[in-house]
Image (tube, coloured by chain):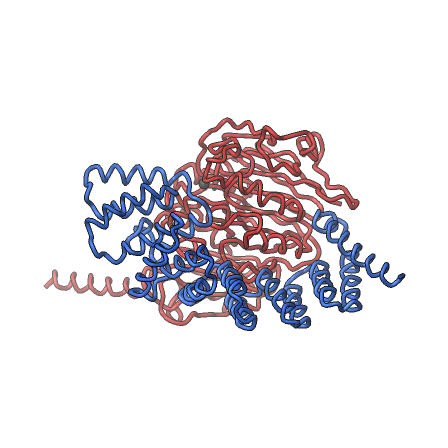
Amino acid sequence: MLFYLRPFWPRRLGWLALLLWTWVAGAHGPWHEQILLVTEKLAQKPRDPELLAQRAELFLAHGFVDESRQDLVALETLQPGNLTNQLRRGWLELKARKTNAAIEQLTAWVKARPENLEGHFGLAQAYLLAGQPGAAETHLSRVLALSDEPRPELFLERAQAQVAAGLALTNTLAGLDEGIARLGPLPLLQKFAADLEMKRGEVAAAVARIQTIAARSERQERWLFLQGELFRQAGRTNDACGRYLAARSAWQALPDKLRRSYVATELRQQIDARLAEFTAASDR
Amino acid sequence: MKLLFLSLIGVMAGCAWAAAPKLIRGPYLQLATTNSMVIRWRTDRQTKGLVRYGLTAQTATNVIAHAGELTEHIIKLGALQPATRYFYSVGFETNGWLSPVTNTVTFVTPPPVGPARPTRVWVIGDPGTATADQRAVRDAFFQWNRGQAPDLWLMLGDNAYGAGTDAQFQGAVFSVYPWLLANAPLWPTLGNHDARSANSGTQSGIYYDIFTLPTQGQAGGLPSGTEAYYSFDYANLHFVCLDSQDTDRSKHGMMAEWLRDDLASTSRDWIVCFFHHPPYTKGSHDSDKRSDSGARLVEVRENLLPILEEGGVDLVLTGHSHSYERSYLLDGHYGYSTNLTASHFKNRGDGREDGDGAYRKPAGTQPRQGAVYVVAGSSGQVSGGKLNHPVNYVSLSKLGSVVLDVNGAELNLKFITQKAELRDYFTIRKP
Ligand SMILES: [Fe+2]
């Protein structure tokens, strides 16, 4: 492992960590200090490949793409044919939004290192940027297969890529269920899966997915309302009405202080609006 | 001959010494639920690990072992009774014990949902300096709390300076709070310094190696799928831990979506949220500067505070600024301090029963009753700042820690300095 985080990074994910970090969080303060520190060291040893690599990565993490490119070019001159520089260049091109170049570099890298998470994650991002969700989902699947404890987001991102690529809903649902099996019945994964169940006309399955969240929840009104929404969407008015009424009862049974959150009052308004719709319809 | 004899004794003593592993970390309590407790410890060499436990020191004869030989020992005790004190000790091989079972090493399982009961929480922020100041804050709490353990304790991040390495956690956490770690479950959040050796995206690195945190809603709340952010219940309290450092803080990120669902699913009376980066501070960090800490303070305020307040949060605890700053009862202030208006104050008193009166969240159907924001980042050092954020009733450059007491309809928070002086307090009441 080559990268900045190496001194205290026991696993193989330093590079990915760095990039995920900047991807998600944006770069900031302490990295400036790191760059200054490495620059000072480089003044003593201007041709030290380790230092050049460190600074190239720090620049990239900090969003200084051109500066990073300069260091990487110098590094590539010092180490012609070095494979890892291909990974670095791939991520550099990705950050520079030169997706074709990124895909080219990263494809070569994962061909040589098929078990490398950083490569597959980079390729997935590059394909997403290039508007090729089908290819992106293949590499997201590799990332998930290679990760011990994947971020919950990755399952959602893959499912979204699969839907965008027009893959069979069964496969996408299986992928979400893999996430649920590995991470637990996360509300967001179950809600996304419920939407997909609706798309393929499986109303009962969609409602059952919301029920898995309800089963973990001390309060029921939100989940009963969502189940009502699913029935309503499917045109099953009586079932929907039943859930909305149950949601209202659950809401009314809440102690006063729980009803007074903004979310709870808003939900009550939504329940009442839905019930009013039904009353209006049955009056007609 | 004499020399040979002495060396033989030396070798034998060496063997005997090598035979018993040494306890070099813990035991420490994690992931407390109403019916289970995780006990962790480290030995200097690989060995089988054992826990013996029971309802008294004399009857601590239930023994649980883990498989394999390890140096990092993790044993989960299950099938426990709620709200019950257990006596325990940890050991090795089949019957070796690293400590006697005494009255001084016990834990109490969290109470179930039901009648409220007095709960005491000790809260420390940015403690991990491994200095005399850190120890003074600890000792002041012990003195103030008459040597008792709290029901649970929270660490608000920057738990081990400067980079959250294993050695730094050893020096700033395990060596400083050994008794507390063994007697009360600790619930931490990730600080920027801890994050230098840890990664939330992959839940790996030292912080994630050291702590056992819920991902499946094991201790209450909805499953988050990650140890980076989680929730848990204790009596009539719902605690939410967010990762303000290394997880997507956007309005519709996975953490934000989970937070919305989690808050709408709890039926506990009080909601307390904790994370590292303060939304309101003029201490060693400035929440009016977008450039501060990679915009984390601003993002937390703009993106996560609305979700928390709409979900009914009562109290938000943070650190990062090495000061104690405590707000009035606030609602809806997500901008810079220059945009603060009178309408953002739900109550502009001191929140004290013997002063302007407690903050009250009255009965009725009106939403958005306000929350108090506390920066408690001075448990290991103080480092100044202007300390003049206008949302705050109190801003102190004082070493200290926070004691949170909840009993039924009343929440009391106190700031105790390193000299065990009470320097701030307030009460929130709910009908
Ligand atoms: Fe910090």
Residue B419 appears anywhere in the view? no
In the displayed structure image, the side of residue B424 where residue A92 appears, left or right: left
Give the answer, above or below, for where B389 lies relative to A129.
Answer: above
Give the answer, above or below, for where B52 lies relative to A48.
Answer: below
Q: In what quadrant of the picture does the N terminus of chain A appear?
A: bottom left
Q: Using the image as rendered, state which of residue B377 and residue B423 is in the foreground.
A: B377
Q: In what quadrant of the picture does the C terminus of chain A appear?
A: bottom right
Q: Using the image as rendered, state which of residue B83 and residue B323 is in the foreground.
A: B323
Judged from this view, the residue extending furthest toward the left is B1
Q: Using the image as rendered, state which of residue A43 and residue A196 is in the foreground.
A: A196
Q: Position of residue A43 (x, y in %)?
A: 21, 37
Q: Position of residue A51 (x, y in %)?
A: 25, 45
Q: Position of residue B350 (x, y in %)?
A: 66, 31
- Examine the image and state in which quarter residue A195 appears: bottom right
Q: Residue at x 79, y 60 (%)?
A: A249
Residue A108 appears anywhere in the view? yes
Give the chain letter for blue.
A
Q: Position of residue B15 (x, y in %)?
A: 25, 65
In the displayed structure image, the side of residue B251 where residue A257 appears, left or right: right
Give the answer, above or below, for where B132 lies relative to A82.
Answer: above
Q: Residue at x 71, y 55 (%)?
A: B115
User: Which quarter holds ligand 1?
Assistant: top left
Q: Residue at x 60, y 64 (%)?
A: A190
In the displayed structure image, the side of residue B112 where residue A117 appears, left or right: left
Give the chain letter for red.
B
Q: How many marks?
A: 0
